[in-house]
Image (cartoon, grey):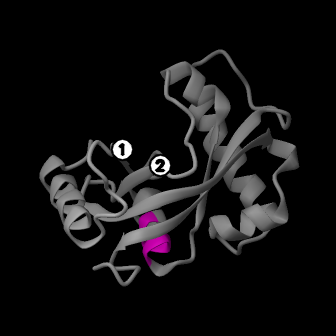
Amino acid sequence: MPDSESVTEMWSALVEARPELALEGTTYSAWHFCDNEADANELADLVMSGTKRATAGLLWFYEEEGEPLPAVGDLNVVTDWDGRARCVIRTTSVEVVPFEAVTPEFAAIEGEGDGSLRYWREAHEAAFTRELAGSGRAFEPSLPVVCESFEVVFGDACSGR
């Protein structure tokens, strides 16, 4: 659960420093990566260092949770596991492809492990298998994956703050 005070402070600072990004009525979400503390914090650090510039999730999850797919221009506050705001990212591209069709280029910009497609497939198959546990669904290489690229627009990883 995001730390609402931390997230609100980050958003207010963005509005002050980069008003062109946060026009009146602009909405945002706040969330952390992954399903465990160690990975969530490591991935937030990778975003902050500029190494991680993409993320991937199962299309099934969005459908199951009734969540809209990310869209180009979306703004999100990335938090650590404890919900402390780390930065604001803006979605730059979204593509839905089968797991088995994720490219080496996408795996590299996701910035995890050694950046290889082999590492990406192993790590994401494990994560998606955990995500599907108890749903009655099993991991399959043909499962559709939402591949989202982003840029940091505010936070210590950019000149904004």
Q: Which residue is mark 2?
A: 74
Q: Is residue 133 something that shows in the picture?
A: no
Secondary structure, mark 1, is strand
Q: Position of residue 62 (x, y in %)?
A: 56, 29
Q: Is residue 131 visible?
A: yes
Give the residue type at disc 2: Asp
- Magenta segment range? 44-48
Residue under the point 73% across and 59% down: 120
Q: Residues within 10 Å of mark 1 (few under 14, many from 20)?
A: few
Q: Nearer the viewer, residue 25 or 55?
A: 25
Residue 125 versus residue 38 in the image, above or below? above
Could you tell me the amino acid type at mark 1? Ser
Residue at the location (73% across, 70% down)?
108
Q: Which mark is residue 149?
A: none
**In the figure, 139 relative to 55: above or below?**
above
Could you tell me residue 96's position as x and y percent?
74, 40
> Which of the image's four quarters has the N terminus?
top left
Q: Position of residue 26 (x, y in %)?
A: 33, 46
